[in-house]
Image (tube, rainbow, N blue to C red):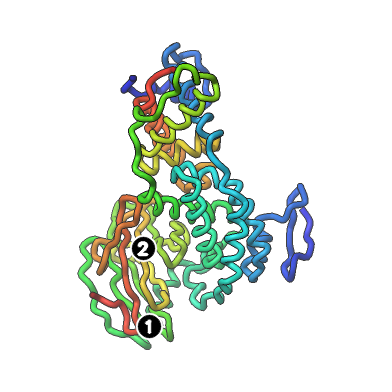
Amino acid sequence: MRSVTFGSVSESRDGTGRPTDGSLVRAAQGGDADAFGVLVERSRRDFGRYAVAMLGDADAAADAMQEAFIRAWDALEDCRDPDRFRSWFFRILANQCRTALRRRHPAIAVDDVEVAAPDRADAAAERSELAARIDAALSTLTPEQCEAFVMKHVEGRSYDEMVALLGVSDDALKMRVYRARDALRGLLGDAR
Amino acid sequence: MSRHGFTPDEQRYLDGGPHGDVSGAGRAAADALVRAAEAYRDSIPDVGARLDAAVLGAVRARPRRARRPWRWAVDGRVRPLWIPLAAAAAAAVVWLGVPRVPAPSSSPVAAVRVADTVFVQFRLAAPAARTAAVAGSFNGWDPESVPMVRDADGAWVVTLPLPLGEHRYQFVVDGTVWRPDPTAPAQVDDGYGGTNSVIVVGPKGLVRT
């Protein structure tokens, strides 16, 4: 890791030459909006899928992320460990998504999801149907179960990473994932 | 349609464990759930890079807030013990006499004004808790940045200097359990199936409606 000058703030770069989150946060805390913009891009790529899955709608997810980013900017001096910006921001985003959940479109019954007609029953149509059924089923879970399932099986995160992001114990997270799987198995039926 | 859940072996298989003890039907159901999740992941649209520009435009129009003068009070470098001591010292000078609210379980009990900052003490009776904290609109709903400490009576307390205005909050017990303050002057839906407590800090202390 080496240090370079970034605006008026000393900056560190990681092994790939990218500014570290910590150096960008420190620059942003000094008022550097461009540094914050880099954090926005990274966080959008990292957590955009989470927001869409939680809210079931890309537009709602974009609104929630924008609000979360603005809250983060306003509260940036409260980010006491800039090197852990990712976890700090995720908690703001997660709270924003929870606030927006009530506005999520009413869930439709999983069984009401349109099933592909026999002449469209190719692999793509089957995957599309599976995706629609999961989307409908997720909205029937508790927010905590939905969040845990999405992070584990949709985003593919490890339990260790989930613990770091959510601040919840490993055992509690596994219980949420297990209960979500049980509920989804009941809703989706067995092997297709 | 199956209405039963996965067995412990099937759960471990879904966590990446071996499939040796998993029945054929259980393994098929587990594999089907994974395939469905993968199909769903592939169907999720990108939030879009346009968001970045929109956020940058918004933050550039918002000047960075000046560093709050009371940051020392919630900075982790300051021992929690100093927080009530500092507030008590301030109270000796400009105590406003906000009446103490009976607190069978919890309550923000007092407010003391210093300049445009009002010190508000939060109190929570949770004898079985291992940790307690306050999270709210004043700290970005961070469940860790404002830990509470036990006072001589065994209650969890923390005193925060808050700017004038409305503040929403909840207590966080043992790091995971969020609970509102039942004795707060107002409660609002948190949009997550729970309740946020609301206090309004005015120039003369807590505003009680």
Q: Who's the residue at 65% across and 65% down the image?
A: A26
Mark with earlier residue (2, 1)? 1
Q: Is residue A187 left or right of residue B54?
A: left
Q: Tell me the chain of label 1.
A: B
In front: label 2 or label 1: 2
Q: Position of residue B155 (x, y in %)?
A: 30, 62
Quadrant of the image occupied by residue A186: top left
Q: Which residue is nearer to you in this view: A97 or B200?
A: A97
Kindly tell me whether residue B177 is visible in this rendering.
Answer: no
Please state the total of marks drawn on the protein image. Answer: 2
Picture layout, residue B152 above or below residue B3: below
* Residue B190 spot, x, y in % from top left: 34, 56
Q: Identify the mark at residue B169; answer none if there is no mark.
A: 2
Any mark on residue A34, and which? none
**Residue placed most toward the observer, A98 or B145:** A98
Q: Is residue A147 left or right of residue B54?
A: left
Quarter of the image where one finds residue B137: bottom left
Q: Position of residue B205 (x, y in %)?
A: 32, 80
Q: Quadrant of residue B197?
A: bottom left
Which chain does the residue under circle 2 lie in?
B
Q: Is residue A56 above or below residue B152?
A: above
Residue at 66 percent of width and 57 percent of height: A38
From this viewpoint, which residue is outermost toward the top? B24
Mark number displayed over residue B113? 1
As helix, strand or loop, the secondary structure at mark 2 comes to strand
The span from disc 2 to disc 1 (Cα, nearest Å) is 20 Å
**Most foreground residue, B45 or B199:** B45
The residue at 52%/64% (across/down) is B76
Q: Whole-percent x and y of residue A187?
A: 35, 27
- The extreme bottom residue here reads B93
The type of residue carrying mark 1 is Arg
Q: Secondary structure at mark 1?
A: strand
